[in-house]
Image (cartoon, helix red, strand yellow):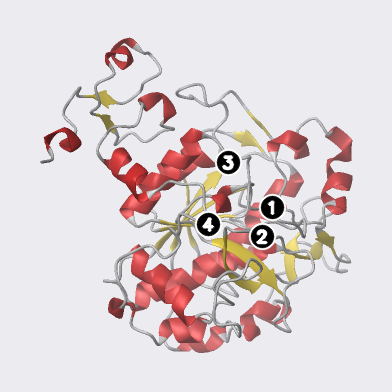
Amino acid sequence: MTTDPTRRRRLRLAGACAMTLALAAGAIALPTAPAQAADPITAAEQPHFAYYHLDQARAKGYTGKGVTIALIDGKVDTTAPELAGATIVDKSPCTVHSSPYSQSHGTAMASLLVSKEYGVAPDATLLTYQTGFDDDGDDAVAECAVRNGHGIEENKSLINRAISDGAQIISISTSDEDLDESTKWAIARADALGVIVVPPMGNDAKDETDAGLAKWSGVVGVGAIDTTGKVAPYSSWGQGTSIAAVGGPIVLRNYETGNKASTEGTSVSTPLIAGFLALAKQKWPNATGNQLLQLMTKTALNNEGRWNKYTGYGVADLGAMMNTDPSQYPDENPLMDPTMHRGPTVDEIQQYMGGLVNPRNIAFDDSYTYRGTDESVINDPDAGVQIHLGTSPHYHAK
């Protein structure tokens, strides 16, 4: 079993070679455990639970209660024993035939977030959005009701859906190419509304500055460390690295074999960080998303005292996050450094909120109103948004 968040749609033609390609890219496959999949997975089997003293967090009432997290990933098996009692709502906009691999992956990520046994935020509400792993045989029953020609729903449109559904934190342990204008504007909306997007850096042990969601300003690119605190040998890096957390190994359900399996990767680190932010949101409910990001970066453990491309601002320190009031920090996203990302810039975020982005580049933001002056969008059947020409507040600024 392997967990590889760096699988992208360019591998969709790899067919039977997809697993070989993923292993060659640096994903770690560990021995299958001799247990049946129906056996519960316990906290004792998950090193992250003891490493982060999650038993102590629960004893103090830090469980993520009242916080809404979105998970964009493979299918989540809500009948898995470790997810019993968890509040999970499937918000997937269309049906996807899920491969055993993607179901293993999605169920594992959901469990790290909200399992009553070993999840970081067991009382949070989890909204799940199923996406496809094309190279693993996933496909939609029918093409989703797409808008603007964006094809099967991917991260960009699902991010917008999650925001509209009230998610405060979005955990994404998979990756499309994520490089187009539609993705940038989905991130701009999240940045503007203080919704925290948490993607992985990847498992290729290489510079991923120009790949995946972590390239965009304002998002939390997550690297991996091992349980000794060292950078994991498989963890990718780049200008989008923001923080690091333990990448396993964890035990998960392998729906390909019917047994338990062990795996590690930045896929694992990502929901841990999302969960930490959910606990901090519960503890500090009046903190903005930006202040929670300030809290995360300023309390991180970093012996160098500055950002680096492998662990970003450092290794996440859950204890410090829960004991440091974020209200002391400015309501500014610390991950918006224009020298380290490709946008959206502060000006672009203002353009989005002012309704000046061409609706052809908007992926399922039903709240968006185009207020620019391009009259050609009026008769565009793909616009899919309200249009009030020339009404942007930008036109009425001094």
Q: Which mark is residue 350?
A: none
* Residue of label 4: 340
Residue drawn at x 16%, y 29% is 391
Give the image location of residue 239, x and y in percent. 59, 58
Would you identify the image quadrant in which residue 83 lies?
Answer: bottom right
Give the image location of residue 234, x and y in percent. 78, 64
* Between discs 1 and 2, the one toward the N terminus: 1
Tag 3–tag 2 contact (CB < 8 Å): no
* Residue of label 3: 178
The residues bearing labels 3 and 4 have C-alpha atoms spaced at a distance of 17 Å
SS label for mark 3: loop
* Residue 61 in sight in this render: no
Q: Quadrant of the C terminus?
A: top left
Residue drawn at x 57%, y 58% is 240
Please name the amino acid that badge 1 sits on. Answer: Pro
Single out the mark in the foreground, 1 or 3: 3
